Image (cartoon, rainbow, N blue to C red):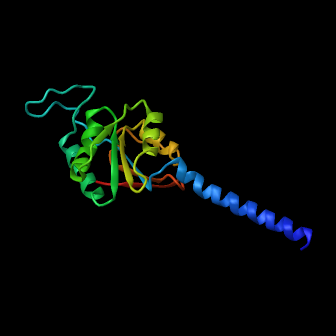
């Protein structure tokens, strides 16, 4: 065999090796099939419900927020969700609690300022399923960007966004749900 054939064969082997490495590397970076990130539902800023004391820094969900949380649970009940994360605030936990309860999962609490810690926890979540994360208007964009999604902002009055990221490819979809 001639020299050029050996070079071509080596070049092909390098290309195949690089392609396989590129395909496998993103999968190792984040284990989940999909990560769904949602901002907490509407909060009750106008007084507490019957018999409730309201902490102004950590208000509960409003009736509209509770309805949105129930809708989220119904939408994602059959989505193969294996883990649910939320920040330390009541509104984020209450947004995903109906889903977690329906699936028999525990809401894993990660402080909102610890995005890097959350990303590490996402990597160790079950690889064969979907992970749901509830955050805030300022943390959701950072989480999505860290998972390979684009830059965006969430308006203070927007509660209907659902961000779906495929970490292995960076594929990103933004949906709205009422």
Q: Looking at the figure, which quarter contains the N terminus?
A: bottom right
Measuring 27% from the left and 57% from the top, which residue is drawn there?
77
Residue ID at (27%, 37%): 91
**View extreme (front): residue:** 1
Side of 48 relative to 16 (left or right): left
85 to 112, vertically: above or below:
below
Rendering quarter of residue 94: top left
Residue 45, image x and y in percent?
23, 32
Q: In the picture shown, does residue 127 fall above or below 118?
A: below
**From where the camera sits, is residue 171 visible?**
yes
**Residue at point 70%, 63% (across, down):** 16
Percent position of residue 152, x then y: 49, 44
Q: Position of residue 172 (x, y in %)?
A: 48, 54
50 over 14 or under it: above or below? above
- Picture quadrant where residue 176 is located: bottom left
From the viewer's side, name the closer residue of 94 and 128. Answer: 128
């Amino acid at each position: 065999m001639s020299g050029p054939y050996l070079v071509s064969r080596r070049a092909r082997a390098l290309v195949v090796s690089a392609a396989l490495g590129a395909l496998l590397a993103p999968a190792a970076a984040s284990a989940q099939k999909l990560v769904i990130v949602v901002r907490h539902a509407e909060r009750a800023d106008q007084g507490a419900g019957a018999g409730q004391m309201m902490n102004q820094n950590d208000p509960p969900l409003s009736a509209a927020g509770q309805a949105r949380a129930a809708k989220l649970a119904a939408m994602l009940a059959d989505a193969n969700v294996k883990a649910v994360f939320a920040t330390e605030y009541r509104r984020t936990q209450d947004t995903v609690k109906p889903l977690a309860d329906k699936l028999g999962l525990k809401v894993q609490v990660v402080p909102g300022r610890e995005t890097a810690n959350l990303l590490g926890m996402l990597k160790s979540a079950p690889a064969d399923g979907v992970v749901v994360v509830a955050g805030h208007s300022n943390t959701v964009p950072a989480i999505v960007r860290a998972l390979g999604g684009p830059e965006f902002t969430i308006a203070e009055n927007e509660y209907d966004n659902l961000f779906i990221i495929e970490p292995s490819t960076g594929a990103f979809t933004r949906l709205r749900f009422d």
